[in-house]
Amino acid sequence: MMVAIAQERDRAAFARLFAHFAPKLKAYGMRAGADPHTAEEIAQEAMVAVWRKAASFNPAKASVSTWLFTIVRNKRIDMLRREGRPDLREEDFLHLEQPVETQDETYEANETGAVLADRIAGLPDDQALVIKKAFYEDKSHRAIAEELGLPLGTVKSRIRLALTRLKTTLPDS
Amino acid sequence: MQTQIDDALMLDYVSGSLAEPVALAVATHLSLSDRARSAYTETMTLGGGLLCALDDESLSDDALDDVLARLDDEDFGDETAGAEMPGMDAGGLDDAALALVPEPLRPYIKGSLDGLDWKRRGNGVTEARIDLPGSDVFRVSLLKVDPGRAMPQHSHRGREYTVVLQGGYRDGDIDLDAGDFCEADGGDIHQPVADAKEGCLCLIVLDAPVRLTGALGWVVNPFLKT
């Protein structure tokens, strides 16, 4: 699908990718505190960036979902914050230890998403809460510790435990 | 003190919640360390999975058409779009700076390293402040320490993030070389000594002034003066 978008500038393929991911990108924006209008704008901007940067997408380095996450996270930072961020060209240098071999990226992304959703549901509540606040609500671990009234060390160890458990779901582990 | 980006800091970086000065230190280290980059990629991949795990939020009816119309504009302006590769621009840095300054740091340094406002801090230490948003709370500097010279012994009220760009230093039983990262927290009393041959050039991000603990600290206090 990404190859069709990058090389053939295939708009039908782009529309399919949009139908699958844009609603999730909007959900992601809203979780971070954006109103529905801004969240939709974030989703749209991210999809335009996908079109623009499709040629630099390398399936050997990252899955489509990881690449999209990188893009939307950067859009979210750009749109919700006044301050800048260091430009790392992260979309370009992401690399996995092993190539992700897949014919159907959307299917693969669904699978990983579903497995991860299960894993998060299976985490102890206190660990799941910390992970959701970090990834979805754009809160630093210090802000989370403050908000929950917990010592920093407790939050750090919950993050460590949760990430260790979640990482076992990744394709290359 | 720790010489790796821990899970919590990496998660902050990946989720995008770090202030720009700290994000800059992390990004600079990531650009220099394969090991850190692979931890980063793992966490990013989790982010991708968590994105997919979200319940869909429905879009307005014309959302796709609107984006397709924007693609027309994109394609129309394709010639310029191809030339503009963000980050590829050397930013007018000279060769010496290009050799020493990793990509994420380049936009913050204009022209040459020598052109920065280097201030002598005594004891073989020179410092150039880097201005960026948040530098009212954070102090972001390049620090040059002459070969074999020691930084004044100090501890921190806040945290100190260091990325070694050239040379290296020894701090107690920790050895840091070019590309390495160190996070020191309040209560860590330390006294880095620069490499005997190459000295040390590093990026330092402080989120509160340091406190000097050595007897001679007050003579050579690079951080409490402005």
Image (cartoon, coloured by chain):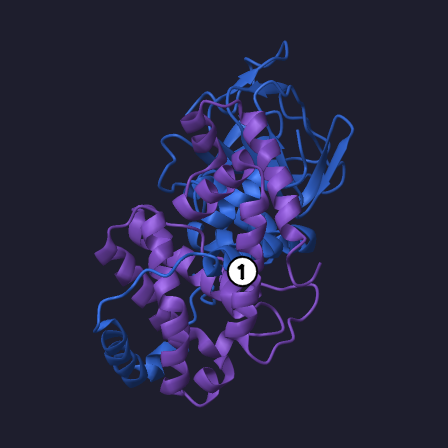
What secondary structure is found at the residue carrying circle 1?
A: helix
Q: Is residue B169 above or below residue A70?
A: above
* Image quadrant assignment for residue B124: top right
Chain designation of label 1 = A
* Image quadrant assignment for residue A13: bottom left
Residue type (three-letter) at the residue carrying disc 1: Ala
Q: Is residue B201 above or below residue B226?
A: below
- Left or right: A66, with B177 as reference point: left
Colour of the chain lettered B: blue
Which of the two residues, B107 or A150, is positioned nearer the viewer here? Answer: A150
Quadrant of the image containing the C terminus of chain B: top left
Residue visible at 39% across and 30% down? B137
| Residue extending farthest right | B173
Please give the residue where the numbered disc 1 appears in the rendered image.
A114
Q: Give the x, y percent position of residue A99.
A: 67, 71
Total number of numbered discs in the rendering: 1
Q: Can the viewer see residue B118 in this picture?
A: no
* Image quadrant assignment for residue A46: bottom left
Colour of the chain lettered A: purple
Q: Is residue A125 above or below residue B178?
A: above
Which of the two residues, B19 or A158, is positioned nearer the viewer here? Answer: A158
Residue visible at 39% across and 61% down? A24
